[in-house]
């Protein structure tokens, strides 16, 4: 779930970053963007992209070094301590 949120935030940030270009702003003609300067939009977009990357690079699994996986067939169903 965190990966989906990370990708979503990153894509939204990239879309926001593309909206800082004047030609893209003219094509889209979104009303609330007229009140935001390009610099403000760029800062907001970069922050959203960084948040997405942080979510993507988060901890992959919750297994510590001393845990041994418990298998049921090929599926890991839990971990036990050594």
Image: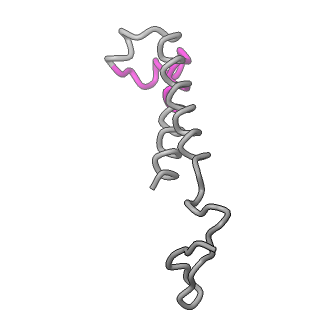
Q: Position of residue 80 (x, y in %)?
A: 55, 75
Which quadrant does the N terminus fall into? bottom left
When the figure is inspected, residue 57 is found, relative to residue 79, above or below; the finding is above
Q: Position of residue 81 (x, y in %)?
A: 58, 72
Q: Position of residue 29 (x, y in %)?
A: 38, 20
When the figure is inspected, residue 3 is found, relative to residue 39, above or below; the finding is below
User: Total marks drawn?
Assistant: 0
Q: Is residue 15 magenta?
A: yes
Task: Please report the residue visible at 51 percent of the width from the left and 11 percent of the height from the top.
Answer: 38
Left or right: residue 18 compared with residue 82: left
Task: Please report the residue visible at 57 percent of the width from the left and 60 percent of the height from the top.
Answer: 61
When the figure is inspected, residue 27 is found, relative to residue 61, above or below; the finding is above
The outermost residue toward the left is: 31
Q: Nearer the viewer, residue 82 or 34?
A: 82
Left or right: residue 64 compared with residue 13: right
The outermost residue toward the right is: 65
Task: Please report the residue visible at 53 percent of the width from the left and 43 percent of the height from the top.
Answer: 55
**Most prominent secondary structure in the magenta stretch?**
helix
The outermost residue toward the front is: 82
Q: Position of residue 28 (x, y in %)?
A: 42, 25
Task: Please report the residue visible at 59 percent of the width from the left and 39 percent of the height from the top.
Answer: 53
Which quadrant does the C terminus fall into? bottom right
Q: Is residue 28 magenta?
A: yes
Q: Which residues are magenta?
A: 14-30
């Amino acid at each position: 779930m965190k990966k989906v949120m990370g990708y979503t935030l990153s894509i939204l940030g990239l879309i926001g970053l593309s909206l800082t270009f004047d030609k893209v702003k003219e094509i889209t003609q979104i009303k609330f963007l007229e009140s935001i300067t390009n610099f403000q939009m760029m800062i907001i977009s970069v922050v959203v992209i960084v948040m997405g990357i942080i979510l993507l690079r988060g901890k992959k699994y919750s297994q510590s070094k001393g845990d041994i996986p418990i298998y049921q067939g090929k599926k890991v169903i839990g971990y036990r301590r050594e």
